[in-house]
Amino acid sequence: MLSAELNRILTRVGPEAPIGALFRRFWLPALLSEEIPGPDCPPVRVTLLGTGMVAFRDTQGAVGLLDARCPHRLTDLFFGRNEQGGLRCVYHGWKFDVQGACLDMPSEPPGSRMKENIRVNAYPVVEKGGVVWAYLGPRDRLPELPDLEFLSLPADHFYASKCLMKCNFQQALEGSIDTAHLTFLHRSLEPMAKDVFAVGDLQQFGDADGAPRFFCKDTDYGLQIAAQRNAEEDSFYWRITQWFMPTYVLVPTVPGLVCRANLFIPIDDENCWWYRVRYHPDRPLSGEELAEYSSGGLDYARLIPGTYIPEGGKANDYLLNRNDQRGSSFTGIPSAQLQDIAVQEGQGAIVDRTQEHLGTTDAAISRCRRRLIDAAKALEEGTEPVAASNGSLYRLRAVAMELPREAEPEEAARRHLVVQS
Ligand code: FES
Ligand SMILES: [Fe+2]
């Protein structure tokens, strides 16, 4: 459990909140590149950490991320016309470029120099890995981009998607580092048609041992979380997860199979985006893999067409089917992603952590909370988060593997954890 005060600190993301300030020290996914697919395409609304913005791609293909409010009389620039190198407000025609400079002010007399003194706040952006990354913090603290492996792979080696979650980001993060739930929430009661978790035969050990032992290691980037399950008589099944500040997770898969990254980005205190990336370091993703990721199935939730909102939600009980729950799946909810969303939204918009009863398999979650709260408090006192200025710390992998019982897991897994360049 957590006191009400610490729970408030952990979950609030506005500019005055300690965790909100911590997030504002990192590059964060703001939107997918596919949302602004080409020059002069329609602008899109973006809300990040409670800040309303508008994103657009100009005639040259450059991406702009501006405060949503036009500096004239503060209407929404989302309505704007994206044309000829800038976004033009539809109220009186003021036009802004991707840097936030005012290019045109047709409501003022010819010769007026007023536009030279008018800017709209424009946020630094970098486009990489199918994602437009944004930085919302102080300009003299520009961080390094996290060197997550998929960011330096060819475009056909990764697939990035996103999905709305109607709950606080921390619930989503805690779900992603909680390997214990694999045995229950995601269990199939029949042989699985697909290797949904990219762990192959090891899934049998995940299903069999629901009480893994956790070994958490504090690192400069966050936590390395090793969970040990019984496997054969002389072996253990290890899952080694990486949690990176602020909310990026690598989920363990067997070396050689598709890798999985989750990034949980606060929209505001009660909603977040789940960015989900699948990538293979050595080969393009197959047509079958891409079809599953883009249209939903056993792993991915199906989205309402034209949106990033899952078809399953609170109003339809996340498509829960009680017959399936009796016969084929532990939950009766159709995809692993929707299963996660159901239980994490099911905790409430912001879970009341004063009421919970944590057990031994919640060790990593407690540690993660403590690290975030400590980092936020340290920042308030002037200590910057180390990971923000060290992108290379993110150059790691997560692994699932079976090892002899006497093996030292970290040592045995080391060669699989570090990305070789
Ligand atoms: S409010 Fe935007 S130009 Fe007037
Ligand atoms: Fe899950």
Image (tube, rainbow, N blue to C red):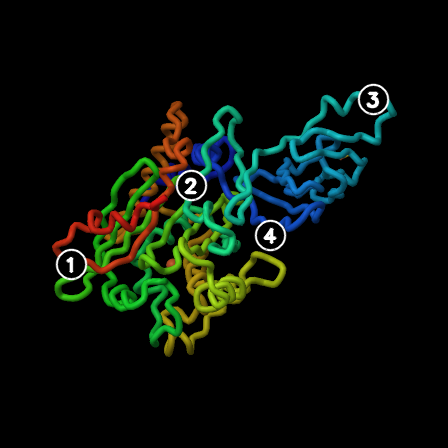
**Which label belongs to residue 325?**
none
Distance CA(mark 4)–CA(mark 3): 39 Å
Tell which tag, 2 or 3, sits nearer the viewer: 2
Residue type indicated by callout 3: Ser
**Residue plotted at (61% across, 40% down):** 52
Q: Assess disc 3: are there few (<14), some (14-19) or many (≥20) residues with their C-alpha within 10 Å of its C-alpha.
A: few
The image's mark for residue 34 is 4
The disc, 1 or 4, on the residue closer to the chain's N-terminal end is: 4
Q: Does the residue labelled 3 lie within 8 Å of ligand 1?
A: no
- What's the CA distance linking mark 1 and mark 3? 77 Å
Residue annotated with mark 1? 404
Which of the pair 305/99 is nearer the observer?
A: 99
Return the residue nearer the eye: 350 or 109: 109
Which of the two discs, 4 and 3, labels the residue nearer the N terminus?
4
Q: Is mark 3 on a helix, strand or loop?
A: loop
Mark 1 vs mark 3: which is more N-terminal?
Answer: 3
Residue at mark 1 to residue at mark 2: CA–CA distance: 32 Å
**What's the residue at 42%, 64% (across, down)?**
336
Tell me the kind of residue under disc 2.
Answer: Asp
Residue 145 position in % (x across, y down): 46, 37
Q: Where is residue 298 in the image (x, y as percent from the top left)?
A: 44, 68
Residue 185 appears at what percent x and percent y?
36, 64
- Sequence-wise, which precedes: disc 2 or disc 3? 3
According to the picture, the residue beneath numbered tag 3 turns out to be: 112
